[in-house]
């Protein structure tokens, strides 16, 4: 592997370590022992849930290709997952406000475990069912856990500022460290030990089951609006009215959908962007480097959120501007650096520049997650939190499905 990758990974590791070790009292929030116990329980559960998700990611496409399916068939499976998240996920996720957020979190575990089991079958219809289940699970993952946390935090009377600490720690571990370890563990299972591409899905099911056991044994139930008189359509109507009547909620939904839309587009396109001429690149190592960059961002976010002088709404404008700038890099380098005509080989000079740009974007992603969670906790009304959060995912899923459907006909730039 080329020295460049080790230098980037090593440099980022040193920066993350320095940021974490250099935190002073201004960068820390003084909390209680009871809160720390509550926070650690949530971060552990969230990390296990994310481990179940991260273990699967690198092997979904590869597993389908090993079963003999082409790009078109695999594309339809992915579209089914996002479509399911948009349609069924919105309904199931919205039930969390009425039926209970803890129950919804348990439903996530069961649904995703069943989705993992379907990967043992080479039958297209079975795999399609798995993608639909996975889409429902994704909606629950990105709404029910956060809704449960915010409600439980407020119910226990903890200070509002402490919530941002839980968010930043959950992202630092769940979306950073756990993602790196899951990628390495999945590689050991599938390649080193020779268990094949199904093994990471089985491991994911085990982590999800452990997390579900902790939820069942240690979490209390909480609700949005549990009143019997409200059916699902009434909930949807109430959420739509809340979004339509409060400009800040509507804008928050737009911010989330637009940023996550760019993020998912990046997920599909970073590989062809870095290897336009089939250059050999270490996908797993680059993925780990991206996740390390995300940890850097979440570490910065924890410092910013700990200081009352920094408003989330202010510094997030800079985050979005920098993110947009990083996506201009592939376009600029395609004009400045002459494209190579040679097939294969190592990463090009333009590719190296883009790796640095993409690492910057991933740092922005690390800043985005705890910050958007903080804003959602401030602006979204408690009684319809899960419903509104799932509404936010509808335009996102439509956007991703359109990109996926047309990805082969669009140029990278």
Image: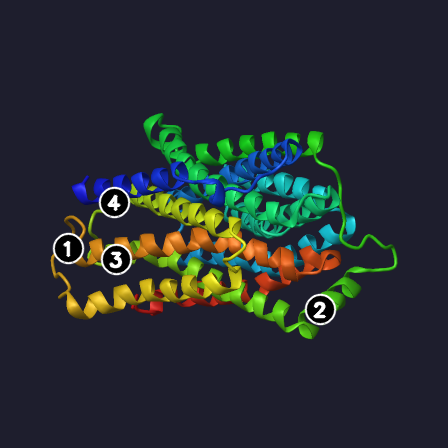
Q: Is residue 296 visible?
A: yes
Q: Nearer the viewer, residue 213 or 34?
A: 34
Q: Is residue 298 above or below residue 394?
A: above
In this figure, which residue is indicated by the disc labeled 2? Answer: 242
Label 2 vs 1, first from the N-terminus: 2
Q: Disc 1 marks which residue?
A: 343
Q: Are marks 2 and 3 in contact (CB under 8 Å)?
A: no
- Could you say which disc has been placed on residue 354 in the image? 3
Q: Secondary structure at mark 3?
A: helix
User: Tag 1, which secondary structure?
Assistant: loop
Please report the residue visible at 40 percent of the width from the left and 31 percent of the height from the top. Answer: 185
Relative placement, left or right, of 405 versus 384 is: left
Mark sitting earlier along the chain (4/2):
4
Tell me which label, 1 or 4, sits earlier in the chain: 4
The CA span between labels 3 and 4 is: 12 Å
Looking at the image, is mark 2 or mark 3 earlier in the sequence? 2
């Amino acid at each position: 592997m080329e020295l460049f990758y080790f230098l980037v990974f090593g440099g980022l590791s040193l920066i993350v370590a320095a940021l974490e070790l250099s935190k002073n009292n201004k960068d820390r929030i003084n909390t209680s022992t009871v809160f720390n116990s509550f926070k650690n329980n949530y971060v552990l559960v969230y990390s296990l849930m994310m481990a179940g998700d991260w273990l699967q990611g690198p092997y979904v496409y590869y597993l389908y290709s090993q079963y003999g399916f082409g790009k078109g068939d695999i594309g339809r499976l992915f579209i089914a997952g996002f479509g399911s998240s948009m349609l069924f996920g919105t309904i199931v996720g919205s039930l969390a406000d009425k039926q209970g957020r803890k129950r919804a979190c348990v439903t996530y575990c069961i649904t995703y475990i069943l989705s993992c089991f379907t990967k043992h079958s080479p039958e297209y219809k079975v795999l399609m069912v798995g993608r639909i289940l996975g889409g429902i699970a994704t909606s629950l993952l990105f709404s029910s856990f956060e809704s449960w946390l915010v409600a439980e935090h407020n119910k226990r009377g903890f200070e509002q500022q402490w919530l941002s600490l839980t968010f930043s720690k959950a992202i630092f571990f769940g979306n950073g460290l756990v993602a790196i370890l899951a990628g390495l563990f999945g590689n050991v299972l599938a390649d080193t030990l020779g268990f094949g591409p199904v093994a990471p899905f089985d491991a994911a099911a085990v982590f999800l089951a452990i997390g579900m056991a902790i939820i069942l044994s240690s979490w209390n139930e909480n609700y949005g609006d549990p009143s019997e008189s409200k059916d699902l359509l009434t909930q949807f109507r109430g959420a739509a009215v809340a979004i339509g009547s409060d400009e800040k909620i509507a804008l928050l939904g737009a911010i989330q959908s637009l940023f996550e839309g760019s993020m998912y587009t990046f997920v599909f396109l970073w590989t062809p962007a870095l290897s336009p001429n089939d250059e050999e690149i270490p996908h797993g190592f680059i993925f780990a480097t991206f996740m390390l960059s995300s940890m850097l961002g979440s570490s910065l976010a924890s410092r910013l959120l700990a200081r009352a002088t920094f408003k989330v709404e202010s510094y997030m404008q800079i985050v979005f501007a920098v993110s947009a700038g990083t996506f201009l890099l592939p376009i600029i380098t395609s004009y400045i650096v002459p494209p190579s005509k040679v097939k294969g080989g190592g990463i090009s000079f333009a590719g190296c520049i883009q790796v640095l740009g993409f690492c910057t974007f991933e740092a922005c992603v690390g800043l985005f997650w705890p910050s958007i969670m903080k804003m959602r906790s401030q602006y979204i009304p408690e009684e319809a939190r899960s419903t509104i959060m799932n509404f936010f995912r509808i335009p996102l899923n439509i956007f991703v499905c359109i990109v996926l459907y047309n990805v082969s006909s669009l140029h990278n730039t």
